[in-house]
Image (spheres, rainbow, N blue to C red):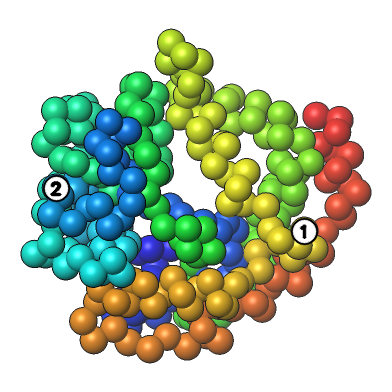
Amino acid sequence: MPAVGEGILVGLDLVNVYTYSTGAIFGIFAPESSGITSIADLAGKKIGISEAGGGEVAFLEASLLKEGIDPITGATLIPIGDGGPETFAAIETGKVDAYSTAYNDIFALQTQGLNLVDLTPAEFSTFPARGIITTSAKLAEKGEAWGRFAKGTAMGTYFCLQNKDACLAMLKEVIPAAFEENKDGVSQGKLRFALSQTQVPPKDTAKFGAHSEAGTQEFLALIGSTIPDAQEVDLAVFLNGTYLDVANDFDRARVEKDAADY
């Protein structure tokens, strides 16, 4: 969603058909040994980012601005990669004091034994994280296919909520490399799955895919604070609910049985 937010704020025609998770994709972290415990502590610090223009940059800059820290003059942003050996070395050697990136990159570092403090602002948890995104033209062109796509997503999500062990087993079968454990029994797959438990379950299981207008508005306001001449976004157009009733019109008892019998 961060890339989507940046796109619509500069005028791209994008539509969210189905919001399927809520929460932070990108975060801000510091080594446990650094003594940094809040965003305010980042004043004058060197902050690693995955790359110039990475999706996390808008969130980082907005978070710094909220604490009165100019992201250009009040801190130094340094590209250090997306969780690989270069990133690990930059943090371990003190080349950077903190690191802002996607949670998946952080999981890669954690499996290598790096202990980090999560500084991510609490309000990020209300933001839309992922959705089924298209354009107005494709929305009209594909018609009812969007309803079928959304229903399949809702059914799969409901299955996983009914039987998390089965869901995890499927994931391990499809992407076994993600579940390779380190000496402490930790894997990126396990960490990702644990995060999904806080981001994917909807507030109301009768409304899979439902959009949060308030959360989306706050999300866009945060990104917009870093974009000169950001355009107004018509949420009634962007948050399209045309196919949400179709998405939720499935036999829950059947899915529950499938999950129980897996």
CA separation, marks 2 and 1? Answer: 43 Å
Residue 127's disc number: none
Please report the residue visible at 84 percent of the width from the left and 38 percent of the height from the top. Answer: 258
User: Of marks 2 and 1, which one's residue comes earlier in the chain?
Assistant: 2
> How many other residues sit within 10 Å of disc 2, few (<14), some (14-19) or many (≥20)?
some
Q: Position of residue 154 (x, y in %)?
A: 70, 55
Q: Quadrant of residue 83?
A: top left
Give the residue furthest to the top.
Answer: 183
Instruction: Tell me if residue 63 can be seen.
Output: yes
In terms of depth relative to the viewer, which is nearer, 83 or 29? 29
Three-letter code for the amino acid on which mark 2 is drawn? Lys
Q: Number of callouts in the render?
A: 2
Residue plotted at (14% across, 33% down): 94
Seen in the image, is 91 located left or right of residue 260?
Answer: left
Q: Name the residue tied to disc 2.
A: 46
Looking at the image, residue 193 lies above or below residue 18: above
- Residue 196, percent across and down? 57, 44
Residue 67 coordinates in the image, percent (x, y) = 28, 66
Q: Which residue is mark 1?
A: 205
Q: Residue at x 59, y 24 (%)?
A: 173
Quadrant where the N terminus lies? Answer: bottom left
Q: Quadrant of the C terminus?
A: top right
| Element assignment for label 1 | loop
- Residue, x 34% and y 22% (percent of image)? 112
User: Residue 121, relative to residue 261: is it above or below?
Assistant: below
Name the one closer to the observer, 145 or 31.
Answer: 31
Question: In screen coordinates, is 257 left or right of 64?
Answer: right
User: Which label sits in the foreground, 2 or 1?
Assistant: 2
Whether residue 167 sits left or right of residue 64 in the image: it is right
Q: Secondary structure at mark 2?
A: strand
Q: Position of residue 45 (x, y in %)?
A: 15, 50
Q: Residue 139 vs residue 86: left or right?
A: right
